[in-house]
Image: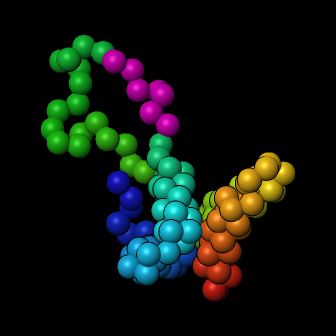
Amino acid sequence: MTNPSAEPSALRARLRVALPMAMKARDRDATAALRSALGAIDNAEAVDGSEVRAGAIENSAVGLGASELPRRDLTESDIAAIVRAEIDDRLSAAGEYEALPGGADRAAALRAEATVLSAHLTVD
């Protein structure tokens, strides 16, 4: 659960607004890129639950949400770094696909996805 007092990220808000618009326009590249970037941001907010240990039932938390941990609060620069990493991943993969026979179409799609994310990143 995110801190309700935390101010929402402008970049994340732009990505969230753009997603339904891309879906309505049936833009597969934009939809895939935006979903992936928003998923990466959500994953970065997740906390590591590896320190949670199983124990006796009588020692467990009781009540709805009692055992949940708060999600990390990401700064605008953290979110921008995640989106930049998504762009870099796509461009790198596009280069690899271009080296494969018949990979030009997928490389073009990945470059289009990177362009979509870049446009949202540079709006500031």
Q: Is residue 73 magenta?
A: no
Q: Quadrant of the N terminus?
A: bottom left
Towards the viewer: 120 or 48: 120
Q: Position of residue 63 (x, y in %)?
A: 15, 38
The single residue placed furthest to the right in the displayed view is 99
Query: Quick check: can you spot residue 75?
Result: no
Towards the viewer: 71 or 37: 37
Q: Where is residue 59 in the image (x, y as percent from the top left)?
A: 23, 20
Please name the residue shown 62% across and 75% down the image.
Answer: 116
Please name the residue shown 47% across and 47% down the image.
Answer: 46
Q: Position of residue 107 (x, y in %)?
A: 72, 60
Residue stretch rendered in magenta on the structure: 48-54
Please name the residue shown 23% across and 43% down the image.
Answer: 65
Most common secondary structure along the magenta stretch: loop
Q: Position of residue 112 (x, y in %)?
A: 66, 71
Q: Is residue 45 left or right of residue 122?
A: left
Q: In this view, does 43 lie to the left or right of 110?
A: left
Q: Is residue 86 above or below residue 24?
A: above
Please name the residue shown 34% across and 18% down the image.
Answer: 54
Q: Quadrant of the C terminus?
A: bottom right
Q: Is residue 50 magenta?
A: yes
Query: Quick check: can you spot residue 102?
Result: yes
Q: How many labels does the image show?
A: 0
Q: In this view, does 32 lie to the left or right of 67?
A: right
Q: In this view, does 5 lie to the left or right of 100?
A: left
